[in-house]
Image: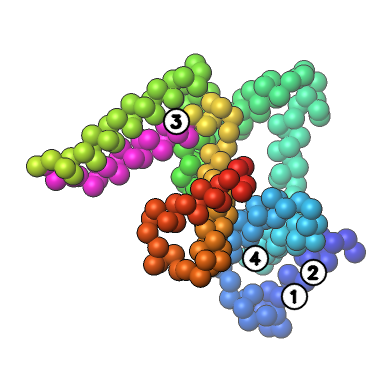
Amino acid sequence: MTGIERLHEIMTRLRNPETGCPWDREQTLASLKPCVLEECYELLAAMDRPEDKANHIEELGDVLLQVMFQSVMAEQEGRFTFDDVANAISDKLVRRHPHVFGNVDAKDTATVLRNWEQIKQSEHRKEARHSALDGVPAALPALLKAQRTQEKAARVGFDWKDAEGPLAKIKEELAELEAEIAARESTRPCDSDRVKEELGDVLFSVANLARHLKVDSESALEGTTQKFARRFRAVETGAKAEGRNLKDMTLAEMDVLWEKAKRAAPGA
């Protein structure tokens, strides 16, 4: 028995209406959504620590479980099976790699990606898609969704020619945001909706710059957030070593510890 066959058998037993697990039997597609999201994020964390092989295996298994769980549910409902899922993705990979499984010539990544998109568009012509932007998953994180939307617009030529375009746009949007914030100091009350809109424009432009620089904005922000957390913990450790509590310190005093943490690990 292969690993996949064993997993399928276990999941089928867990979902058995009479002898299965009460929790597993009660699950629905809606109830599994948070589980799918959580497991994907845990896998992302494991991918940052490839040296921890056991954890990487575990998290890949948890994601595979979610695929099998839904497949067994669908099988019980007579909709499709795990084999249908595996065959569907296999067929897609073969279709979209004609340079490997067919006679198409594609010697570089750029050609491969162009062919992929053309094949993908031809597949989706059968669906009710009317915009070049159709197909961006609605549930994507905002920064990633921005980049995917920008990528689709770029494929039909709606794009800056280089990074100077989005860089200038960031400066323009920042000026507009500053103008709205400055309204707080004027007689006109600051419009929070306008501030939100202008801030969104800045973030969208930053995501666009990241795309032009071939930087994943989600990964970049995650890296900076982790760096901030490491330095802040170092500040907490420094304060504790002095017998002090951050709540009792001034911002200037905390900033001294912050600069010390930066000097101790410049890139961290």
Q: Sequence-wise, which precedes: disc 3 or disc 1? A: 1
* Amino acid beneath label 4: Met
Magenta stretch in the rendered image? 188-208
User: Could you tell me how far apart the alpha carbons at marks 4 and 1 are, in whole angstroms?
Assistant: 12 Å
Determine the secondary structure under disc 2: helix
Q: In this view, does 227 lie to the left or right of 66?
A: left
Whether residues under marks 2 and 3 lie with C-beta atoms below 8 angstroms apart, the answer is no
As drawn, the label of residue 131 is 3
Determine the secondary structure under disc 4: helix
Residue at the spot of label 2: 9
Dominant secondary structure of the residues highlighted in magenta in the image: helix
User: Could you tell me how far apart the alpha carbons at marks 3 and 1 are, in whole angstroms?
Assistant: 44 Å
Q: Which residue is drawn at 75% across and 42% down?
A: 90
Determine the secondary structure under disc 1: helix
Residue at the spot of label 1: 13
User: Could you tell me how far apart the alpha carbons at marks 2 and 3 are, in whole angstroms?
Assistant: 43 Å
Residue 121 horizontal/vertical position (percent): 58, 29
Q: In this view, does 156 lie to the left or right of 68?
A: left
- The foreground one among 186 and 90 is 186
